[in-house]
Image: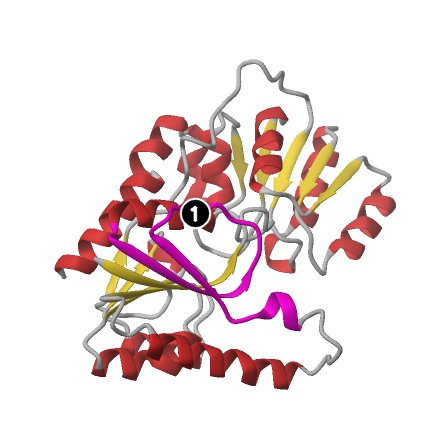
Amino acid sequence: MRLLIVTQVVDQNDSVLGFFHRWIEEFAKNCEKVHVICLKESVHNLPENVAVHSLGKESLEFGIWNLEFLHRLVYVFRFWRLIWQKRRNYDAVFVHMNPEYLVMAGWLWRLLGKKTALWYTHKSVDLKLRIAEKFADIIFTASRESFRLPSKKVQVVGHGIDTDFFTPDPNVPRGEHALSAGRLNKSKRHDLAIHMSTEQGRVLHIAGEGPERKNLEALTHSLNTHVEFLGAMTQLQLRDEYRKAFVLLHTSETGSLDKVVLEALACGLPVVTRDPALKHLESADREYVRREHSLTALIEKLVWILKNK
């Protein structure tokens, strides 16, 4: 199968989407050819059967014009040009977390006879998602809570955790500090992790960056507690933190299965979560992640479904 992937970023060092580099590698193992359209392209090392086509954010965002509307027009034009020029070079489309691309091109892909799939793991349900659901042939999600729009097209397939990368390291001694990981948004509730670590008398490391950082730093100061803000991290840096911490404090209120929980477990890091739906994971281990959420098995399943459904 020849596959077109549409995603935001191709950059193995990106602090949020760096993991998707490994997804593309696994897709490449299971497909004859993979074309990737991304909004922004940076550092990557992908197999020869992968072609990356950027919409150009990496150049426009540092340009002399700071006109977001104009940039969006450029992105849309380049997107339409690419999907039309490459229409004979792909059989199916996999849209990662961006339903707006199905809103823009779902009708065309349907006319061209292309199988379309949307990967979506977020509690948000907006008009874009409702329209995208109509055009998608299949919707993949990680857990029942990760897709809130009722649809017969939904297939719950688990997260894709690279269990060959996220591994324990017996040569790395664990410290006594707790870890909280994820973008610094209100919904991640790192403030609760700060309160929990303070009550336990533990130092807390927070891995991630985002708009809530100043508020979290102010809370740390008011509580006179010890918190280290690690900032945005690559996958390699985050793995090192999983290996060194004593426990992961999971306080997110997104309502869905958070992949940082699974990554931590894969690295042998115990988890304490405030989410009642995830309490069973406090007793889970690395083998559970390998069995239920392996990246290799996930991509094989996605490709098989795209070929046969």
The amino acid type of the residue labelled 1 equals Leu
Residue 100 lies in quadrant: bottom left
Give the colouring mode of the picture: secondary structure
View extreme (top): residue = 171
Q: Which residues are magenta?
A: 31-60
Q: Tell me the SS state at disc 1.
A: loop
- Residue plotted at (55% across, 82% down): 74
Q: With respect to residue 94, does 247 lie above or below?
A: above
Left or right, 271 with respect to 278, comes to right
Q: With respect to residue 167, does 260 lie above or below?
A: below
Which quadrant of the figure contains the N terminus? bottom left
Residue 286 lies in quadrant: top left
Could you tell me residue 110's position as x and y percent? 23, 79
- Residue plotted at (58% across, 34% down): 248
Could you tell me residue 46's position as x and y percent? 43, 47
| Frontmost residue, 72 versus 201 | 72
Q: With respect to residue 222, does 54 lie above or below?
A: below
Could you tell me residue 115's position as x and y percent? 22, 69
Residue 189 within the segment the image draws in magenta: no
Q: Which residue is mark 1?
A: 46
| Frontmost residue, 13 versus 42 | 42
Could you tell me residue 128's position as x and y percent? 42, 79
- Residue plotted at (72% across, 58% down): 212
**Res. 131 visible in picture:** no
Label 1 neighbour load within 10 Å: few <14, some 14-19, many 20+: some
Residue 57 within the segment the image draws in magenta: yes
